[in-house]
Amino acid sequence: DIQMTQSPSSVSASVGDRVTITCRASQDISSWLAWYQRKPGKAPELLMYGASSFQSGVPSRFSGSGSGTDFTLTISSLQPEDFATYYCQQANSFPWTFGQGTKVEIK
Amino acid sequence: QVQLQESGPGLVKPSQTLSLTCTVSGGSISSGDFYWSWIRQPPGKGLEWIGYMYYGGRSDYNPSLKSRGTISLDTSRNQFSLRLSSVTAADTAVYYCARVLVRPAHPDYWGQGTLVTVSS
């Protein structure tokens, strides 16, 4: 299985801060990477796919980059509704696997 | 708007079979554009893909389940189901059903999740 390692596991930030989350794959996954946001008690929501393509309706303050084994999700100016847990997921080979999650908390 | 909703027992005894159903609204499971999947998250652990079924009959399961899982589609009810046999406490988890784009394989809609506890 391809292992996905996210860092940090949690981050404390303030509204307006820039937040960057990284995701590293244990082998080359090209651009077969997605990012999800999950809020407590809610279903995860797809934010980005293909490493850098927006899902419909996602605010432009979110951006993704990377290819191969190293990827980043950046929130350029953190908003109150962005406090959540974020996961990366590879779709290069089955079983598709997720990172362990990064919790973005209010500072 | 596509919605998915899991249903099934919240408590299963060890060695028995876990059975869950996902009801899909706002879209047809007969569509060839999607896989229909189950994903779980044990308490304090990460998300784990259980498997998927495609309307055309293709399916695949995580080898970590050691052939205990079966996913089936009921097109007449627009539902799909998971059966996981010979459960142990390690199968205690929040179980999510999800619609997964065929290419790339990313879930674009998820259910809210249902907690299943394996305990006697």
Image (spheres, coloured by chain):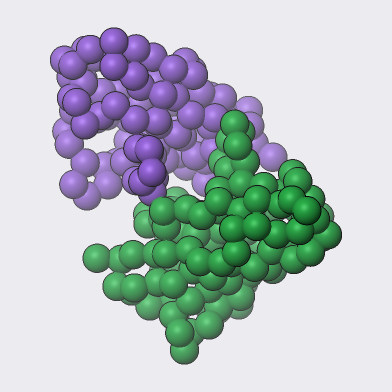
Q: Position of residue B30 (x, y in %)?
A: 44, 80
User: In the drawing, does residue B19 fall left or right of residue A24?
Assistant: right
Residue B2 in the image, given as x and y percentages of width and height: 30, 66
Would residue A22 appear left or right of B70 to someone viewing this image? Answer: left
* Residue at image point 24% right, 65% down: B1
Left or right: where does residue A80 sit relative to residue A46? Answer: left
Q: Which of B110 and B107 is in front in this view?
A: B110
Point 53% across, 32% down: residue? A99
Q: Which of B93 and A5 is in front in this view?
A: B93
Give the color of chain A as drawn: purple
The quarter of the picture where residue A58 lies is top left
Residue occupying the point 16% across, 15% down: A16
Residue shown at the point (38%, 78%) measured from the top left: B28
Q: How many marks?
A: 0
- Rendered-image quadrant of the N terminus of chain A: top right
Would residue B104 be visible to someone looking at this image?
A: no
Residue B21: quadrant of the picture:
bottom right
Q: Above or below — where is A57 with respect to A84?
A: below
Farthest residue in the front direction? B120
Residue B107 visible here: yes
The C terminus of chain A - image quarter: top left
- Chain B, chosen colour in render: green
The front one of A20 and B77 is: B77
Horizontal and vertical percent for residue B56? Answer: 55, 79
Q: Where is residue B108 in the image (x, y as percent from the top left)?
A: 37, 54
A52 in relation to B70, above or below: above
